[in-house]
Amino acid sequence: MPELPEVHTITSDLKKHILDAVVKKVEIKAGFSVSPSAGVFKKKLVGRKITDIHRVAKNILLGLDSGDFLVIHLAMTGRLLFRKTGFKADQWERVIFTLEKDGKIGELRYTDLRMFGKVKIINKAEYKTLQNKYGPDPITETFDHYRFLELLQNKRTNIKNALLDQTVISGIGNIYANDALWIAKIHPGTKTSDITPPMAKNLLAAIRGILNESIFNRGSTLDDKMYVDIFGKQGEHQNYFRIYGKAECPRCYIPVKFMKLNGRGTYFCENCQLKSDQESLL
DNA sequence: ATGTTTGTTCCGAT
DNA sequence: CATCGGAACAAACA
């Protein structure tokens, strides 16, 4: 479930609590695969110190003193939970990392219901490849709406699908794509070729605004409670959704339209989110 | 029981 | 040949 704000929240909390910790033990539960093989994975991890923690797109990266990186992608239902040793078992445990910091022992638990998430060790070269895969990060990189527009113009799809394309702009998922388009008053089905410079400018500002607001609110926890922070606490941003999951438009108070666009649930207001061909009539 | 789900990747189609 | 979009991945819930 996590998108950029949720991954950001987890990453910054990890940085506060487990930076400089040493990995004492790694347990991989039956039925879950890590990369490389479980044996190599453990060998590259046990005894290593975590010297750097940051986010790349929706990936959590833990830099090790060996130069390798532990990469965790939570996909739809992954969680990272920081627990005291002996704390009751969590649901859907897949990998347990035992850590020691300042003489204190704790566990970082990777749990994942659907197991779409990825846990792997990569080297420096693979880290470069990972970084290069992604488009600009809307909150950590400085780029303007001209560059954004250029990236969009290279696509032949609708704007919502382009926002979800991590090679165009990274970190946005379905929820924030819906809300950003609503804030920018752009119809999700608008062809990227119909996006004008003012639209790109508004949209980039909307994306940055909504992502930063959600980070302030420590991310969004939906009804299924899948996203929680490393201490098991829910986010608050679900209380501030604009159009995602809504029945009526907060601006127009008319019923929200729902459709499937590229297989993803898409909410929009047909009154205030205009397609560009309609916009030209204004 | 069938349909739905915050993400990504693979493969067939265009 | 590059790009797009649907299916698949797996499990719980309504």
Image (cartoon, coloured by chain):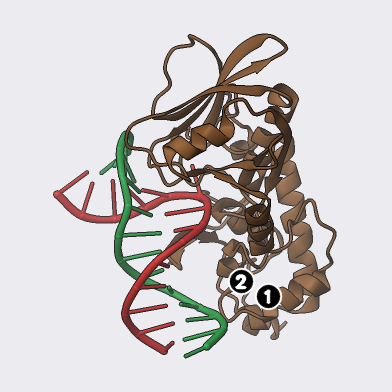
Chain colours: A brown, B red, C green
Depth check: A213 or A94 in front? Answer: A94
Q: Please tell me how crowded label 1 is: few (under 14), some (14-19), or many (20+) other residues with Cα within 10 Å.
A: many
Rendered image: mark on residue A18: none
Q: Earlier along the polypeptide chain: callout 1 or callout 2?
A: 1
Q: Amino acid at mark 2?
A: Ile
Pointer 1 with pointer 2, Cβ within 8 A: yes
Q: How far across and down, in percent of the image, does residue A212 sit?
A: 75, 45
**A72 above or below A186?**
above
Depth check: A173 or A206 in front? Answer: A173
B10 on left or right of A80: left
Q: How far across and down, in percent of the image, does residue A230 sit?
A: 60, 26
Tag 1, which secondary structure? helix
Depth check: A28 or A264 in front? Answer: A28
Residue corresponding to mark 2: A159
Residue drawn at x 43%, y 42% as measured from the top left: A37
Q: How far across and down, in percent of the image, does residue A269 sit?
A: 57, 62
Residue drawn at x 61%, y 49% as measured from the top left: A58
Residue corresponding to mark 1: A152
| Disc 2: host chain | A
